[in-house]
Amino acid sequence: PSFTADAPFLLLLADVGFTPGVQISVNITSSEPGAVFLLLSSTQLHDWLHGPPREDTDGNLSSYFASQWRQPLSRQLSARIDLDLPKVDFFYAGIFDPTFNAEMPKKYKIDLDFVNAHGQHLPVQWAKLPLMWAISSIAFSFFVQGAVILTSTTWYRSSTPLHGLLMLCAALKAIELVVRAELFRVLSLDGDAPPWKLKVWRLLHYVTDTFELLVMVLIALGWKVLRSRLSDVEMRCVRVLFATGMLMALAEAQVTGPFRPASGLGSIFAITQMVIYLSVILTVNQNLQILAMGLEESHFSPTTILMYRKQQAYFRFRIAFYLMLLRPSIL
C-alpha cells in the first residue's frame, strides 16, 4: 500500500508479538531520500519517547538511538531480517524522517510481512484467536438451536417477535464468528486473504452490531415487554437507526484490511453506539422507576404479579446489558 507521511514518525507495526527466529520482509520505495526504517522493541520505543530529544550537527532530530534494526532509505529498500530473540517480545516498526516537512511530505510504497515460528503469520497474542472464535461460534449455534426448540414447544404461547429478533442476533453472531475464524485462519497460514473474504466479514460484523443495537433499543423502549406496540414517532426513530446502521455496514464493508481502520464512518458508528448505549441505560432505569412506583401504589392482583415479572425481566436485562458492555473486545 501507499502512504503519505503526516508526522516525523510513520508507524507501520504496533505492539506485534514476535517469537525467536522470526523472519521479517521489508520492501519500501520512497519518493525522496533522508528517512530511516526502524524496528524497535517495546522497551526501546519507551526509552526513545521518554528520553530527551537528540539533535544532529545540522539541528535536525537524530535517528541514532537504540533499536533492534535500522536502515536509511535512499529510494528503495529491500531486506530480509532474521531476529534471533531470546524470548517472545513485542515490537514496533516505522519510518522516521529527521527532516520532515509538512508542506512537502514524503510518499512511500510499503510491503511489510513477517513469519513467526512454525510458519505463523499472526502476532503471538493473536495466534489462538481463530480457535477461540470457532468455539464461540459453536456456543452461539447451540444457544440458537436451544432457543428455537423452547420457543416452538414449552415457550410457544409466551414467545413474541422480540424472541425471534434475539435468536436472529445470536444466529448472525454465530455466522460472523465462524467467518472471522476462517478468515484469520487463512491469514495465519498465508499472511494474506482474498479481498472478498475481508469484505464479507466486515459486512457481517457491522450488520450484527446494527441488529444488536436495534434489539437493545426495542427492549429499552418496552416493545413486547411493557406494551405491545411503539408510538409512530418511536417507530420512525427505530427505522432511521436501522437504515443508518445498514448503510454504514455496506460502506465499511468496502475496506479490505483485516483490522478496523480509523475511518470517518467507523468513528461515527462507534460514537453512535456509545450514545445508544447511554440512552438504553437511561431508558431502562426510567422504566424500572415507573414499575417500582406502580407496584408501590397498587394492591395485590394478577396485574401486580405481571408488573413484578416485568420488573424482574428489566433487572435481568440491565445485568445482561452491563455484562455485554464488559465483554472482551475480541468478541
Image: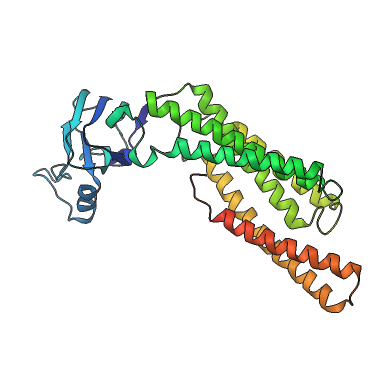
Query: Where's the N terminus, which quadrant?
Result: top left
Give the quadrant of residue 16.
top left
Residue located 80% across and 52% down the image: 234
Where 210 falls versus 309 (above or below)? above
Towards the viewer: 267 or 46: 46
Residue 65 is drawn in which quadrant?
A: top left
Check the image and tell me how it is coloured: rainbow
Identify whether 223 is placed above or below 88.
Answer: below
**260 relative to 96 in the view: left or right:** right
The mark total stands at 0
Which residue sits at x=33%, y=30%? 120
Q: Is residue 291 left or right of residue 33?
A: right
Q: Is residue 21 left or right of residue 212?
A: left
Q: Residue furthest front?
A: 154
* Residue occupying image coordinates x 16% and y 35%: 84
Question: In the picture shown, does residue 28 fall above or below 158?
Answer: above
Q: Residue at x 20, y 50 (%)?
A: 48
Query: x, y percentage for residue 131?
Result: 46, 36
Q: Is residue 75 visible?
A: no
Q: Who is closer to the viewer here, 259 or 159?
A: 159
Provide residue 157's location: percent of width, then percent of height.
87, 48
Tell me residue 217's x, y (percent): 71, 52
Frontmost residue, 114 versus 323: 323
The image quadrant that residue 98 belongs to is: top left
Q: Is residue 311 visible?
A: yes
Q: Nearer the viewer, residue 221 or 97?
A: 221
Image location (x, y in percent) of residue 281: 66, 61
Residue sitting at the far left: 57
